[in-house]
Image (cartoon, rainbow, N blue to C red):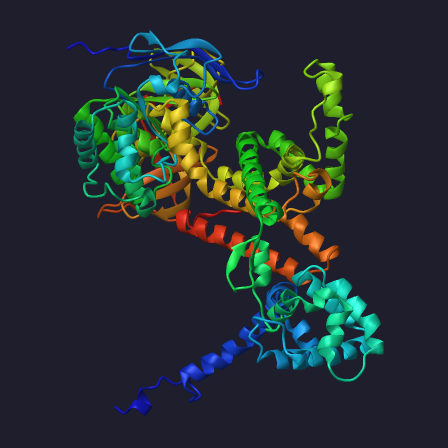
Amino acid sequence: MTVNKEFVKFDKVDKSYDGKVLVVKDLQLDIAEGEFITMLGPSGSGKTTCLMMLAGFETPTNGEIYLDGNAISSIPPHKRGIGMVFQNYALFPHMTVYENLAFPLRVRKIPKDEADKKIDKALSMVSLQGFAQRMPGQLSGGQQQRVAVARSLVFDPQLVLMDEPLGALDKNLRESMQYEIKHIHESIGVTVVYVTHDQSEALTMSNRIAVFNDGKVQQLSSPDELYEKPVNSFVAEFIGENNTFAGEVSDISGSKCKVKLPNAEILANPISIKQKGERTTVSLRPERALINPSEKMDNIHKGKIEEVIYHGDHTRVRINLLGNPEFILKVPNSSSNLDIKLGNEIKIGWNSDDARALDPK
Amino acid sequence: MSSETKKILTTDGIPLEVSLKKAERKNKIKAFLLVAPLLLFLIITYVFPIGEMLTRSIDDKMVTQMLPKTYKAMENWDGKELPPEDVFEGFYFDYKKLVEEKTFGKLATQLNFEKNGFKSILKKLQRKMKKFEEGNYKEQIMAVHPRWADVEYWRALKRRAPEYTYQKYLKGIDMYENEDGKIVNVPEDRQIHRILWLRTLEIAFFVTLFCFLMAYPIAHLLATLPMKYSNLLMICVLLPFWTSLLVRTASWMILLQQQGVVNDFFVWIGLVADNARPEMMYNKTGSYVAMTQILLPFMVLPLYSVMKTISPSLMRAGKSLGGTPFIAFWKVYFPLTIPGIGAGCLLVFILAVGYYITPALVGGASGTLISNQIAYHMKSTLDWSFASAMGLMLLTGVLAIYWLYNKVVGIDNIKLG
């Protein structure tokens, strides 16, 4: 079976609300059939606007959106056949759960017995059998959320859009719902476009993540690549924790470069720098730096412990290192604990491969 | 353990319940004192006047107290033929006393409500009475005017004997109790109240309908427009609210009269000929137009407050699930606005049913309502008990509508803001 790689295609899409500012700039994005793709970004980055354009509630100012090869900009939302889960669920408060689910089937004039089967199936998918006659107001937030998911899937759409659907839930429920939505996606193979500002949500659920900022996709890649190999300092900052050093490239040769800091020099992996003399921000994940490195690492420096915070499974250590007082280390809590005390001088080491020299901030 | 020790005591040995009451008493008194002025105000301005209205509408003590001897003597009269001498004698002395006290005019007014023609014969009696001789008052009174020898007048007098009466209510629906004690309709050519009741309901119904049709889109616009435009629109809706009712009605008179602005405009665009300008005032049209405009905000505000709470994502959800914009509106949006519709319609209908100034000024003969009739009896005929009776019937009608609404829609479904 061939998978349509361009099931959804944003082709040079621009969007402006007021004719002065572009909310979405020259968006080029292909979404494959059956994919779970997440649009991640801070608020105001244009991700929700993209979703609304796909759903048909906003029209692109320029460019075209294709769904399964057809341009859809002139098709009204109710003819697009796209399922949608809204931020506040948008369940119809005057209808029972059953009527909520029956709504998309009734407007499609699906016979009642067939509709009932579909509703049963959708409700069992979100494990809400027996809730059909409840009113939405009688359900908890998590249950309402599941009804909203079931309603968006009950009419078998090929594409489902989710606009920060878990935003209103508490942490534990949010995590279990993440898995539930992921499992539903895996079991029925529907294409999902998911919008969130929560990076951990994006990392756990998606096949691919599009990081939005300033109306543009900064990076589009799988969660692990996004975390391990951010292509610019915005992505590095936005996804996960990050230690940075700002400096100037003093030497570059192949996969290594030297970066001159105000009072030291470190080795780094040149990602977005081309030549000597460029300004750069070196990004290093906290878990990639080790205390008292035993093996031979090409960056070893001394720093002073400024703060120690106990986190249960690990300890966060803040160190003043090479003029950066905010250098964070994550030390796993094992029985052979290291001598981490406030004010101690310790040795820190990392591989130059993990220190990515990105664009200056 | 005995029951004595089971009682929970506070640390200083007083039963918990007692000390709790003591602690709460101060707050209770405070709370009561806070609402006391309002309570007093309500009693003085609402409960008391309505009670007064009720008693006034059925109170018929005045005549009873004016003619004590007459009614005492009438107890033995069967009402079939002319009353015996003792009734006439009692009436003579009662009336003489009234003449001396100079309060006989009130009696004449009251009896004239009961039967036309009483006023003149009572006046005549008052003039002739000075020359009456003692004894045989029946003959002497009957000689004053032939109507005094008409048994109908004496029956009418007897009908006023009870201290309480529901006659005014019957009159309010164009009925009366005839000589045989049966309740019958007044002759058709003299029925005016029924027409007025029906017209009041009709005008109130249509004004409510027009208000609803006009207010729904406005309220929707208000609820969905961005703040800077919706504030401006809100001011436009409320602006008439801040203008005197009389001024607004007067401006409608300027607009709607035959030589008025609207008619001029119609003639100018060639809709009507100059010599065939339609009458838009001093008839129902005038009442409809002016009342709809004046009552519109009462419909807009409850609708707006309900629509404001409806999340726009609901309509979007309806559309994304495949509903056309109309279906999304009709199945999703509209049902959610019903509490606002109910509140607005009830408010406008109740206000319209009792509307007075506007129909009085622009309604003319065919556009006046029951409230104008009530005012007429308050000010012109001074038949306050009849006015009270009609006022109470109006109030009962409104309460009935309220009850009906509660049965059908549920009063807790109402939302005023």
Tell which of A180 and B221 is nearer to you: B221
- Residue B282 in view of the camera: yes
Q: In the image, what residue occupies the spot 78% across and 78% down?
A: B96
Give the camera-side residue of B28 and B365: B365
Q: How many marks?
A: 0
Q: Is residue B166 left or right of residue B380?
A: left
Q: Quadrant of residue A267?
A: top left
- Asked if A123 appears above or below B370 in the picture, the reply is above
Q: Is residue A297 left or right of residue A124?
A: right
Residue located 39% across and 33% down the image: B332
Give the image quarter of residue B210: top right
**Image quadrant in which you'd find residue A222:** top left
Farthest-out residue, left: A1
Please state which of residues A33 and A239 is positioned toward the viewer in this rendering.
A33
Please say whether residue A292 is visible from this viewpoint. no
Q: Quadrant of the N terminus of chain A?
A: top left
Residue B135 position within the rendered picture, expressed as x and y whole percent measured from the top left: 75, 84
Give percent across and percent down for residue A280.
46, 20
Choose between A112 and A215: the one closer to the eye.
A112
- Picture layout, residue B398 above or below residue B247: below
Name the residue at 64% across, 78% down: B84
Up-down relation of residue A73 to residue A224 (above or below): above
Q: Is residue B95 left or right of residue B178?
A: right
Residue B203 picture location, percent across and down? 58, 39
